[in-house]
Amino acid sequence: MTVLVTGGRGSVAHALIDELLAVDAPVRVVSRDPARADVPAGVQVAAADLARPESIPAVLDGVTAVFLYAEPAGIDGFLDAAAAAKVERIVLLSSQSAQESDRSNPIVHRHAVVEEAIAASGLAWTFVRPGAFATNALGWAPSIRAEGVVRGAYPESHSAPIHERDMAAVAARALLEPGHEGKHYALTGPESLAARAQVELIGAAIGRPLRFEALPLDQARAQMLTQMSASAWPGIVDTLLRYQADSDGRPVAVSDTVGAVTGRPARTFATWAEDHAPAFRAGR
């Protein structure tokens, strides 16, 4: 029973590979550039590009389950190949935003398009829908290392960040166990925290006082545009700022899905900060 993992360079995929290896599940990772794939010994790496349908059938040989990132390009061709290869189930890393109706929102559009294609494919599926990734905080690392400061428009904007290992644990069960077909798993961390509180928890993890400096909205937007990759989705900065404004001073809902699926509670943001403390320490 080989599990195919796409997005092998992502934090969730890395954590998922560890989950699968821990139970001796055979793993194959897809990469456009196998030479750059950083995977543990014993993990197969196969060259393919999901946007090139002709590259897909070979990597699906012997695969029974697929962990898929939400990439609209090539999704129909990939699903056709998966059906032909008799893949038994697809587990999609989606987003809580997929349930929203505003298709002008690039996060909603990206994830909803892929969910709809999978649901129409006839394959068994599970949609893993996290809210905020705790790893988003790694975007603060350069200014924390250099100055001990995080800057943004909404220091009291709330989220319930989820550890990548918790997303991976839920995905692993959906890939390996029956009973998860047709489920939409909304995932969050165990607590709603303001951005300022998250920064303080990172400071506690590295033993250094940190502060959050509020910026005017136009300055925060310019900063985000500079920091975002040139390949970022159009409109993503304004979308993220709207999410921050909507939760400014407003705690967000927290889900217990991680505990229900895995049998143990979701990890706290404090735990995540301790796990990733080296990324925030000066001199790295």
Image (tube, rainbow, N blue to C red):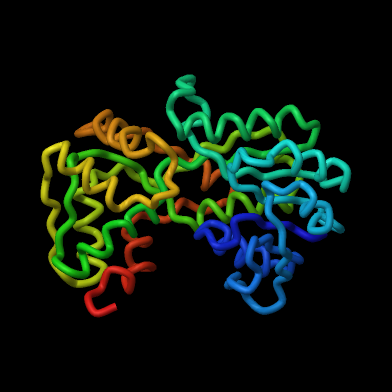
Q: Is residue 180 above or below residue 63?
A: above
* Whole-percent x, y for residue 43 in the image: 70, 72
Image quarter hosting the N terminus = bottom right
* Whole-percent x, y for residue 47 in the image: 72, 63
Q: Is residue 84 left or right of residue 237?
A: right
The residue positioned farthest toward the top in the image shown:
101
* Whole-percent x, y for residue 33 in the image: 63, 66
Between residue 123 and residue 178, name the one nearer to us: 123
* Whole-percent x, y for residue 19 in the image: 62, 63
Residue drawn at 32 percent across, 39 percent down: 237
Residue drawn at 83 percent across, 58 percent down: 58
Between residue 249 and residue 225, name the one nearer to us: 225
Q: In this view, does 172 lie to the left or right of 106?
A: right
Between residue 266 and residue 240, name the one nearer to us: 240
Residue drawn at 19 percent across, 40 percent down: 154
Residue drawn at 86 percent across, 58 percent down: 62
State which quadrant residue 94 falls in.
top right
State which quadrant residue 284 falls in.
bottom left
For the image, the number of numbered tags is 0
